[in-house]
Image (spheres, helix red, strand yellow):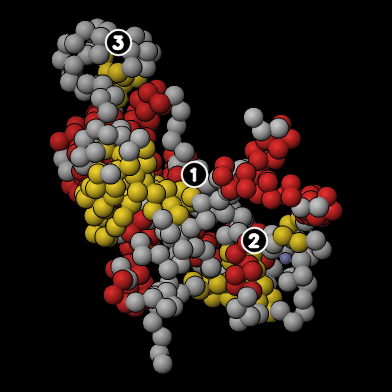
Amino acid sequence: MTAPPLANLINELSKLPGVGGKSASRIAYYILKRTTGEAESLANAIADVKAKIFRCSTCNNMTDVEPCAICSDPRRDAGVICVVEEAFNIPTIEQTRDFHGVFHVLLGALSPLKGVGPQDIDVAGLLKRVQSGGVREVIVATNPNVEGEATALYIAQQLHSLEVKTTRLAFGLPVGGDLEYADQVTMSKALEGRREI
Amino acid sequence: MRPQRTEAIILHTFPARERDKLVVFLTPDHGKVKGYAYGARSMRTRFGASLEPLAKVRIGYVERENDEVVRIESVDLIRSLFPAQQNLAASVAASYLAETVDTFAQSGDPAELIYRLLDRTTEALLAGASPLHVVAYAEVWTLRLAGILPSLRNCNVCDEPLGRPLRFDAHAHGFVCPNCAPVDAQVIANDVAAALDAIMRTPVGEIAASEIAADVLFEVRSLAAFFRRNFLGHELKSYEILSGVLRA
Ligand SMILES: [Zn+2]
Ligand SMILES: [Zn+2]
């Protein structure tokens, strides 16, 4: 039988996304082998993140300052808003270093199958930002799947009457992929999003 | 390890582990099947758009011993829902169809009729049919195929043939004749009864092209909702969202 404190840790770890029972047990034994100091710094990091991180009141990004580092950066162009489903999508776009605008996190995507409707995602916050003026373009960077498409369509409808350019991130062929393996949806989206060279 | 290859319609997918998807799909011969598609969430997935909800596909999978979850080996896209995504009501209606079928279809048993219903109604949405017409059709037929829809021909209490107007008695869970009808029985407008009759004998494409008015279809839907809730004990998750979109 596993000692209760160890079983408890394994149980807590196995609730993490992508961690099954086996991995949870491996991580728990790994932590046991570390020094007390190392284990404490892991525990403190977890407690810290809950105590100090909150949502930016402007863009819903996870932050420890209000407004967040991106919203308060004078070098960023507040006239271009990139809309993403979740805060963890921001680093993916940031790492390109090609985007100099600001973000808006919806906190989800329209998903009727999960009972998530238009009222459950933060489109209202986005509309308020656009209505308050100065926004030239909204780039919708929701996921390239059925839910992300429905969300993008809903946002486009809501922004329609406001004077702002609304664009959707291009869909297309994966870099390093082979044309031969593209299905008809990927291919027709790639054709639709073609550009002059 | 038994390999299978069949036509299927994707009902629902869930993220699983790092890059995988757990996929629920409907097949004509084996009903609802659950399977893992390894690597399906990665940007370079070989599954592409073929595992999105309501995609019609040819799917190859392997059944594993003592495991109700199969391993998906190959998926070829026959028809995608993406073109219907240009219309929010059609997109939400499609999700609602998927949830309806997911709720009522069984695992393991042949499901040819409900498969065909889902196939034809999705096809109609892709062809630009009115989502309200398609949804009302699918709701009534799902109840019929599940054996929950009470007779429109004979009294639910005494089995005498029913005339018009149709009377609905919530306590008897169905339609009743004038003799059996309690004072609070709801009289169904003749055009609503006619719409129910038409749905029973007409393909979805014709219903979608028909002139059945929206308020008549809302009545049909509320009757269907009564039988469905009564049977399930709850409402479908996407019902309210769809209602909001159809009203807009
Ligand atoms: Zn911010
Ligand atoms: Zn009777």
Which is closer to the viewer, label 3 or label 1?
1
Q: In this view, does B69 lie to the left or right of B115?
A: right
Q: Could you confirm whether marks 3 and 1 are on the same chain?
A: no
Q: What residue would you read off at disc 3?
A: B181
Q: Distance between the residues labelled 3 and 1?
A: 40 Å
Q: Is residue B115 or residue B84 the one in the foreground?
A: B115
Q: Quadrant of residue A4?
A: top right
Residue A114, numbered circle: 1
Could you tell me which chain the residue with mark 3 belongs to? B
| Residue B93 rendering spot, x and y as whole percentages | 37, 48
State whether residue B199 appears in this view: no
Q: Position of residue B65 (x, y in %)?
A: 32, 38
Compared to A176, does B142 lie above or below? above
Q: Which residue is drawn at 83% across and 50% down?
A: A36
Q: Residues within 10 Å of mark 2 (few under 14, many from 20)?
A: many
For the question of whether residue B99 can be seen, the reply is yes
Residue ranking furthest to the right: A37
Q: Residue at x 38, y 76 (%)?
A: A177
Residue lying at 36% horizontally and 10% vertically, measured from the top left: B183
* Ligand 1: image quarter: bottom right
Chain letter, disc 2 residue: A
Q: Are the residues under marks 3 and 2 on the same chain?
A: no
Q: What residue type is labelled 3?
A: Ala
Name the chain under label 1: A
Mark 3 Cβ inside 8 Å of ligand 2: yes
Q: How many labels does the image show?
A: 3
In the rendered image, residue A20, in percent from the top left (x then y), is placed at: 55, 45
Q: Is mark 1 on a helix, strand or loop?
A: helix
